[in-house]
Amino acid sequence: MAKQLHDFQSGQRSNATMMPFAQMLSEQQIVDVVAYYASLPATPGLGGEDAAEATLKRGEQLAERGDWSGYIVACKSCHGPRNQGAGEVFPGIAGQHAGYIKAQLQAWKAGARSNDTQDLMGSIARRMGDDDIHAVAVWLANQTPATH
Amino acid sequence: MLRQSTYAVLCGILLLSVNAAGADETTQESIDTLAALGYPTPTENELVHIPPTMEDLAEAKLHPQLKRVIRRGYDLFTNTQQLRGENVFNNMNCSSCHLGAGRMPFSAPIWPAAVTLPDFRGKNAHVNNLEERIAGCFTYSMNGIPPDYGSDNMLALAAYHHWLAKGVALYPQQAIYGRGFPAPDRPEELSYARGEAAFQVKCSVCHGANGQGLRVDDQTVFPATWGDSSYNWGAGMVRLFTATGFIKNNMPLGQPNSLDDQEAWDIAYYMSSQERPQDPRYTGDIKETLEQTREPFHKHSLYGQVRETDGHLLGAHRNLGGKPFLKPDTVRARTFE
């Protein structure tokens, strides 16, 4: 989260609402607000409640096994077991809001977001169709969020 | 579903049935994807086979018990860490090297083993069947001991290989498209320093600055590229051309063929200049071991050579990594006499 706030400050990541607020934060305030959010219990993601079974099945395939016919590697190959995050760099995405995952993948695909290490996310997002982005977003929203 | 054809079929000269046409579409889609990512397209008469997926397995007309065993094979292949301490003594999964759960061309797809074996193998100088070939991976790449021949786990792994080979004729005479890890031509000079710099920029975000990899909840997310948790000195990946071919065709994950040939060779040279667990064929003396294994194997690795940066003799140690034995007794000569 600290990286994202810094990236909003530097303009490496762009969002009309977040950029001005991020600008107002001092280094100490970023540390404090990140610690506060990290202390809150993880709550289930919204936006995947009404997804069709076939869509969820496709989402599960993409997240757990990928679709190599389009060279789309599985989310979990970087985001870790149950997509709950791996190390300092790869965030937990299980239980994230569907609308957020969808917006971010679309932003990477369109080139509007590019603050990932070595374009690791961008290069995969650009190979994903809109239906696949939707499917993986609603499936992830239905998973148990990371507890740490 | 049959997804095997020669390139001639892909070109639309032969369309045998509606099913075959659907299969060819899937094959063509995969080839188009690979071509767009910089892989070569199949040459005329190459055997092209895009294996079925686990989604295809759900639809397949197979006995439910067989499906269960194939699923177990898939599960063992993609999370081999469940055999940690029993058969696996490092941080590798089968799928760490065989990307796409063993299905992907240019990532040493595993189905060819199911249709080309039994065959003579130079590494151990006798005829090996599929189980003995799988045992080789456990012995060297997993720094471990194979599941017993004929055991449930060995049978499940073999069944998964056979499932991926579905529809391919045994002992094909044609060359196989995307077999192994084809390496680009070796450049004149390899550089440890350039390899180290490139590793830190391109590889360390996942594999760690010291090649240690990353584990989460007793599962491997990113495999160790050297050190006690990596493959041992007898694994195919210690050969420079194998590591280069893997890297060039598959790394960074999701960005195949993005490194130039020199970079891929330099990174492989740097990785291969680091220590790892002893070769199970070690006799107790590195010179003797090297003499016995040089021709079929170590002439392609840096084992027994002096590292240029600090004079360290690579492989001159008794470190077995995480395992309590040197060599499983499945490593033995067969004479068929």
Image: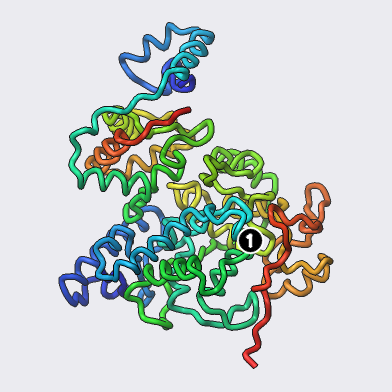
Quadrant, the N terminus of chain B: bottom left
Which residue is labeled 1 in the image?
B144
- Residues A41 and A21: in front is A41
Residue found at x 32% / y 75% = B167
Q: Chain of mark 1?
A: B
Q: Residue furthest bottom?
A: B337
- Label 1 CA crowd tier, 10 Å (few <14, some 14–19, many 20+): many
The picture places residue A50, in percent across and down from the top left corner, at 18, 34
The picture places residue A19, in percent across and down from the top left corner, at 37, 14
- Vertical placement of residue B126 versus A63, above or below: below
Q: Is residue B104 visible?
A: no
Residue found at x 48% / y 64% = B108
- Vertical placement of residue B37 versus B291, above or below: above
SS label for mark 1: loop
- Residues B222 and B202: in front is B222
The picture places residue B189, in percent across and down from the top left corner, at 67, 56
Residue found at x 83% / y 66% = B284
Q: Is residue A113 visible?
A: yes
Residue found at x 26% / y 47% = A58
Q: Report the side of B137 relative to B77 (left or right).
A: right
The picture places residue B77, in percent across and down from the top left corner, at 47, 59
